[in-house]
Every structure is written in C-alpha cells, then in structure tokens.
Amino acid sequence: FGHSVAVAMAHSMQAAHSPTEVEWLCEMQVPDLVNDVMYALLAAKPQDVSLYVAKWAINRLNAAQKEELFSSFGMVPRPRSQAGTSSPSSNARGGVLVPALRPHPKPSAPTASYHCYAHGPKRQHYAKLNFSHKQPEVIRQTHKLSLPRALSTAMDFDDRPTQTPSSVPAGALLRSRSQSVIIQNVKLPDFERGVLDWYYSHSQRPMLWQNLERYIRAGDPLARDTIRYLDLFEMFFSFPGPDFMNYLHSEFEDNRQSAVLEEVSEVVQRLTRPPRLAERHEFDVLLVVGDDYDPQIWYEQMVRSQNPQDPLGYGLVVVSNFAEALSALLMNGNIQSVIVLDEIIGTSPLDSPLSDSLSAYNVLVERPLHRAKADKSHETLNHLIAAIRIIRAELDIFLVTERQVLDSDLCRTVRRVFFAREDFYGELHAAILSWVSKRQATPFFSALVTYASRPIGVFHAMAISRGSSLLKSTWIGDFLQFYGMNIFRAESSATCGGLDSLLDPTGSLKLAQKKAAEAYGAHATYFVTNGTSTANKVVLQAVLGPGDICILDRDCHKSHHYGMVMTGALPAYLDAYPLHEYSMYGAVGISDIKNKLFEYKRCGLLDRVKCIVLTNCTFDGIVYNVQMVMEQCLAIKPDLVFLWDEAWFAYANFHPVLKRRTGMGAANRLNLLLKAKEYQDDCKQFWDRYGDLMMSDEAEDHAKLADVRLYPKPKEVVLRVYATQSTHKSLTAFRQGSMIHIFDQIFKGGTDISFKEAFYTHTSTSPNYQILASLDVGRSQMQLEGFQFVTDMLGHAMHIRQNCGQTHTNLSKWLKVLDVSDLIPEQYRKAHGKDYFNKRIGQMDRFEDAWMSHDEFVLDPTRLTLFTGKTGINGNEFKVDWLMDKCDIQINKTSRNSVLFQTNIGTSYSSTNFLVHSLRKIVHEFERDHIASGGHLSAVWQAKVDNLTKNHALLPNFTCFHDSFRPKDTLGNEASMRDAFYLAFDENNCEYLSVSQARKAAEEGEILTGTTFIIPYPPGFPIIMPGQIISVGILDYMQKLDVKEIHGYNPVQGLRIFKKSALANFSSF
C-alpha cells in the first residue's frame, strides 16, 4: 500500500497545487473513500488516483512512514511555519499545520492552462480566459472546511500529452457532453465529480453561486473567474440577471469584493431556498426584442410597477435574436410567458459554448434558425413562434406589433396581439397574470378544498366523512393522527356543492378534464381512479366488438389480454424481439406489423382489423417511433385505431424531445404533416411509384415494400389515437390515478357513445375524490414546471449511468447499467445506434441525438436496468437482501439477473448520489465478504454466475390456439379467447399435470391446451393464454424460472389444461 501511494505521490509532485485543494479532501467525511482508494491502489492503477487522493492518503501515514516515503523518492518535507508566521490561508480559519511536500529542485513543470468562454458585461462577445495554479504555502488540517472548488484545476495524470493553449478547442471546457460545464481536463475523486458532473449545465448554476460566495468570503481570486462563468447562465434568467452581473464586474474592477458579499449571499439564499417556503409564486417572462431596442421602458412599466403583495410576480429575461430566445426556453424552465416584439429579429447563431449542453440544440434551435434564414425576413416572426410552440407548447405567447395580423395560424398560436402605438403595458401585465393563473388553476381540487371548509352535516353514506366516526372513537385515534383531519373533511360522496360526478361531469371535474386535454394536446381526456388496467379495458370495449380482430403485442400488460376476453375480439398476437440473456422482451418491429396487415389484406380480412395495441414505453424503457408506426399502418389501413399503453410515460409530453415519441405528440405532428403541401406532393410521388405494389394481393409484391416508407393518403386517413397513462407512476398523483387521452377525429358523434358506455361499465359510482384532486393538481404542476422537472429527471438518470459506467471504479467490475446496444438490436437503430455511455472517453453522449433520429426504437434514459449476473446474485435477491435490507432503497421490477431503477420528477440530487453511494457500498461489502469467504474459488458461486450469465432461459414465442377456438376464415392464429376462458370455468373440463409430466407428454406429440393465463413475475407477461397450445419451449422456460410468483399456476396442483374430451365436443365457430 505504501509503495503504491508513493507512486501516486510521485505523479502528484509534478503539479503545483493549492492548500485548499487538499484540506477539503483531508477532512471530507466520506465513509467509503478509504475503500475506493484501497481498491484503486491494489489494482495497481496509480494513474486512477488523483493528486487529491494521493495527498489525502499521504496525510494518513505516520511520521516514520512519511520519512521513509520522502527519502525513497528524493523528496523533502516543507518545514512547518514558525510560530506567529502562518500563511494567509491558515490565518483565515486556523487549524493544525502539517508538512507540505515539494520535490527536490528540478526544472519546473509548465503551469497548467485552462480555457473557457466568459460572457462579457454587455453580452456582446465572449473573451478567452487564462488562469493557473499558484504554488502551495502550507497544507493544513482543520475541521472547519469549505466545499471543493468548482473551478478546481488539478492535473490529469494519464499518459496523454498535456494540451497547450493553442491545441485546446474553443470552449472545450464548456462543450463537455456530460462532465461539469467547467471541468474538462480535470480529474477529480468520484465523490467530488458526482457533485459537478451533471448532464445539463444549468443544473450547476446554484452550485456556482454557492462557490462564488465562498470564494469572496475567503478572498480567493477564483471568485472573479466564477463571475465570468456565471455570465453565461444569467443572461437567460431574470434573477439575479445580467444587470447584477454587471454590478459584480464593476465592484471587482474596483477591488471592492467584500462589499458584494451580502448581495451574493442573498442570491444564494434565494436560489437554494426550498420552493415551498416562497412567499409568492415568481416566474420569468421572456421578452424578444430587436438588436437595437432599449428595453428600459419594459422594466419600468412591467416589473417595477408590480405590487409585491400580489400572489404572482415575474421578472423579464430580455434577448435580442432568434437563437437566444429558443436557448432561453431550453435553459430556463421558469419562463412562463413570451412577449415577442414585431421587430427585425436577428438570426445569428448563439455565440456561446453553452449551446452543446442544451437539450437537442441542433434540432430545436439550429434547424428552425436555418429555416428562418432561408425564408423571407418578414417570415422570421412566424418561424420563431412556431419554434417556441415546439419547445414549450404550454407557454403563453403575446405579440406586440404595428401590423394587422391576418395569419390564421398565428392568431391561433398567440394569446393576444397588442399594438405598439398604444399604452398596452397594463393590459399586457394583466393578460400575463391571467393566463398563468389559468394554468395554475385546479378546478376540482379547489372545489374540494372549499367543500371541506364548509360546516356540512352529513346524512348519507360514509361515516368517515368529516372524520366523524374517528372523532368519536377511543381506539383508532392513531389513524386520525397519522392522516390529519383534512383528508377526512374532503372525504365525501356528494356530487353537488361545487363537487361533481365522474360518470357525468358538468362542473369542476369537467373543467379539470378539459384542462388536462389541453395540456396533453388531446381532443378529450378522462380521469380514471382505478388504474390504467381499467383505462385499457375501457378503450378496448369502446372500439372493439365480438369477432373484430385486434393486433397486439403478446407481452403487453395483462389488462389487454383480459380485454380480449371481455370484448370477444379475436387477438392476433405479435412477438416482440427477445432479450434472452436478460429474460425480457423488447418491442415489435415495424416490419412485423406491416407484414401482418398485408397478410390480412391478401386474404380480404383487412376490414375486420379494428385496432392495434402497443406498449410505449415498455417496462424496461424501449420506446417506439410512434409517428412512423402510425404513418406506415395508416398507409395500409387508413382507419386503424391505435391504443398506446403509456402507463410508464406520462411525463414525456412535457419535454420537446420525448414528446415526439408519445401517442398524443405524434398524433398532432402527423395531423399537421398530412395537411402540409410538401407531404402531399411526396405522397403523390409514392403512390405513383408504388401504387401497384400497395394494391396488389401478392406476397412477393408486399415483400418489396418491407424497407420502403409508406405514405398514407391524407384524404382517406382517419386519425384515431388513444393513450392510457398511469399518472401516478411518474407524476404527482395518488396511487391508481390514471388518464385516458383521446385524439379521435370521429369521436364526437361516433365513438363517444360506445366510449361512455364502456366508461360507465368500469368506473365506480363511488370514485375516490382524493385521487381525482391529485390528477387535477398533477396536471397543473406539469403545465407550470413540467419541462424543468423532466429535464432534471433526465439529468439525474444520465448522471447515474455515468457513475455506474466508469471503468476505473469497482462498481463497473461487478454491476453494469445496460445501455442501448444491450437492449436494442442493431437493425432497429440504424440512424443513430450509439450507446448513451461512451466507454472510450468515459462520458455520456447526448441521448437526444437518438431520439430525434429515425431509429425504430430508442431507450428511455430514465429506465436504468442494472445487470447483476457477474455477482451470482439474482434480481430478486439483489432487490430484497441488498437494496432494501442493507440500503433502504425501494425498487419494483426485477428479472432473473437484473433490477430496474427509475428516476421521476421527484428524484433529487441527494437521492441520486445516495443511490450511487449505496451501489458502491454494496460492491465493497460484496467484495469484502466474497474474498474473505473464498467465494472466487467456489464452484458453487461460479455455478450461480454461469446460471445468470450463460445458461439463459430462452423466452418462448407465442405458439397458436387450439383448433376448437379458431375461426375457419382467418389467418389461423386468431381465436375466441373468451370461449376458452369460460369453458375452463367448468372444472369437469380440466385436468392437472406437473411441469415434468407435461413436458414428457408434449415431447411425445400430445397436444396440451392451456385453460388460464399463466403469468410469471418477473417478467410479468403471460407465457400461456386460455386456449393456447403449450409447447416444449414454454415448459422448458417454466422449469428454468427461479421466481416465486407465477399467477395462474399452482405448484401443488400442477399445470391446468383442458381434457381432450372437452375440446373434442366444442367449437367456437
């Protein structure tokens, strides 16, 4: 150990360093830091130990060890400061002095240079900065420490040559894809990098302000550099904003740093204050002006005239060109309104290195910017407003102009138009507050609060209403104490007095659902209080009838399969691509879907195909190219109904990148696309060229269209898209709170009647009002801060991926977060195809690049599948024994050799780092116990590893249904699953076999037919359906399963199958 430390120390002596860099590390209370250092050193990788860790380890050696170390490497200790002559840094905080180290005189190493771009006071240009280390005075130990320097410039000790200033790319530090916006060539201990390395640069803004406060307090010259970095951010925020940054610059120019400490401390306090403690709601308004426009009058009329007692207040963010406006929307999630002045809007690119750290900048900013440049100058305004709507559709846009606005699209997009020659400021101010208040409004929740505050006497059902039965009790007062009175005051069965009926809403609930539809871009939205399982059955019953054919993914949620039983529709199952090594399925390829539709066309049954059901995203995070799927299917069957099960995807609508691959987002995009003249021209060319093949009934003709983009005819298409979402899974809502979103062009006066009947069938007449209120509140929250929250949850997920993927940590030795290439086969990701974590450079690539491509499938970054096979620990054991029992971490989904983590809008920086730290703790404990017990030499342990990594349980494909349940005039793989389901209700029709007996019988050619759904958890999809033929492959899979929970299977009784006599005398058709 001592020798390895010495090697690392010898490296570290090549760099000059300041005492502050060391004192923080020496006293940081990080429990597992010792273990991290030990493993790095024992692995004989001193280059992976930064100078921080080396110095930290050196200062833990005793005097004799230090003396031996110094002499062996020709180093001498720096003498202690004489009494009364301590260094400035030691005077600042005191503490016990320890020797600082320096090498014998040698040619000094070149000073480390770093480059960044700092935003000038007038936001005109970016100047290149240079700063370097100063020589250390003394290394101190103290228990009163500051946090690490954000602008730490420790040397990188890998073998690559140091970049000279001329070889460092412009803005290299700020253009880092995943590391800190500041640090690129800096190697930091993992726990420090965990604070700084965040996927989106704006996440570091509060941290930079905190560091600035510390630097000013300590008199550190890095304060000046930090201010220049903050200039990059503050141009997009009203508080503290560019004016305050100019003030800081001027004070520092006059060497009055201490004078601004109080103001900077106030900024830090406001930026880090818990939002719930804010006295009023404050937001930003984006003002887009011309290049030479003076916005001073706007501050006087719109900001300074505000009443501080109002519940809402705002500041102005002023930008002067196209790119700045869109960048502000991506950077600042607190912008709620946009004011656009009909001036000459500049189209120069964003001259800031922050552009690469903005979400999908190349598509969301550069692409519309290029379109605006290519168009006439007076059309720039239209391009800008359209781009704003794409990025943040929920924002209120106001236009100030001297022209009469006749453009119908523009009139629909902007909230209100004001004429510049009038005194409009008061009206505009009122309009801004009014429209934000409308999004903030929660009609049903507010009605429930008002109802609960009234002194109402209850002479109907619900003894618990208003807490009456609890207040009288002498035994169950703890129940009341735990929940509090408000929840019981709001517990009611009333549908009047401001409340409403879920079955037939006419008041507050109807308005709440209308607001939800507007938020999601739906024609209509319905609240569901008993989960998406019920939502799925409602939609299926509304659009399907007995004998209709429904194409669906075989491994979709069980509610869809039960929907087939309930409706009497004939399921036509498609198999998703299997991931045998992880015991999970992916998704269904578009070629399989097209082939199935063409098959029905060839046999003349296309008119009976009513609906297709697909899961988006899947439990494991596989996401479809939704628009492509619908476009290609509609080219074959123009009135096909799409049901997108988005139980895990409710948040996606509030981020411009994710929204493109949602049911409602794609429906709106496709609706606009079908009306575009360019598309109609392309469509005509397609049908001129491929029309004969499309109309053919020959399989070989249809095979020629396998890789061709199909164009539906706009005049024939009827868009009918339904999306069901478990709002409670990822947004703010109580458990079982779900929504049904509808984009159906024939819903009104068509499907609405059957939909309401289905809704009446499955909806309770006693819905839970707390669930309904939470759906109302959750919608409001996402319309106001959804973009920021979703951006943060994505950043948290990518941060976890990076920390788990670093190859120099022991974490990656035993555990692996599965990436794109692990979960999506190459043929489905031809356009982009990259992993999110770039192993070559140890950083994250932009996931947005894949999502904005034409790839058939992408991976949701927030779904993190952790592979545990190398440890020999199965998924369920890792979930229970290690995550829950040892670390208090809750997860749900597992497979034979993996566990699934998810980030959501409630995920915080603390919880993210807690997870990473816990995983490191688990790996440390595993390694310690594993080596101590001789596990690495154990044949038993190796057998467990082989079972989880090599001996895969092959996922079975769907076989077919028994002839007794299959119609005679279809393709042959459909069946009346309802008949099979109810035939099994008569126990006289059934018998039982053990799995081994069934396997032997199947091998001998006996036909075995299932009677029930058999669903192992995990993975959670049915491997046997009622009426399905049971194959040897299915039985092999059941024998290899090592899960405890298998629905529909009783291991004591065995496998339940139909008797041959029962099927011989039965026929569905």
Image: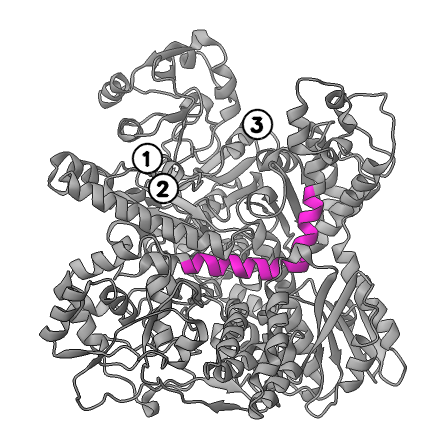
Which percent across, then down, holds residue 151?
Answer: 42, 77
Quick one: SS at disc 3? loop
Q: Residues within 10 Å of mark 1 (few under 14, many from 20)?
A: some
Under mark 2, the amino acid is Met
Whether residue 1015 is visible, yes or no, is yes
Residue furthest out toward the front: 83
Under mark 1, the amino acid is Glu
The magenta segment:
774-799
Q: CA distance from mark 2 to mark 3?
A: 29 Å
Which percent across, then down, holds residue 306?
Answer: 82, 71
Q: Residues within 10 Å of mark 2 (few under 14, many from 20)?
A: many
Q: Are marks 2 and 3 in contact (CB under 8 Å)?
A: no
Residue 877: mark:
1
Vertical order, 669 against 293 (above or below): above
Q: Nearer the viewer, residue 123 or 683?
A: 123
Left or right: where 728 falls relative to 845: right
- Report the mark closest to the observer, 1 or 2: 1
- The residue wearing badge 2 is 584
Q: CA distance from mark 3 to mark 1?
A: 40 Å
Quick one: SS at disc 1? helix
Residue depicted at 47% across the width and 65% down the height? 848
Under mark 3, the amino acid is Gly
Residue furthest out toward the top: 988
Find out whether residue 778 is within the magenta segment: yes
- The residue wearing badge 3 is 568
- Tell me which corner region of the image, top left, top right, bottom left or bottom right, holds residue 1014: top left
Q: CA distance from mark 1 to mark 2?
A: 18 Å
Quick one: SS at disc 2? strand
Residue depicted at 52% across the width and 17% down the height? 982
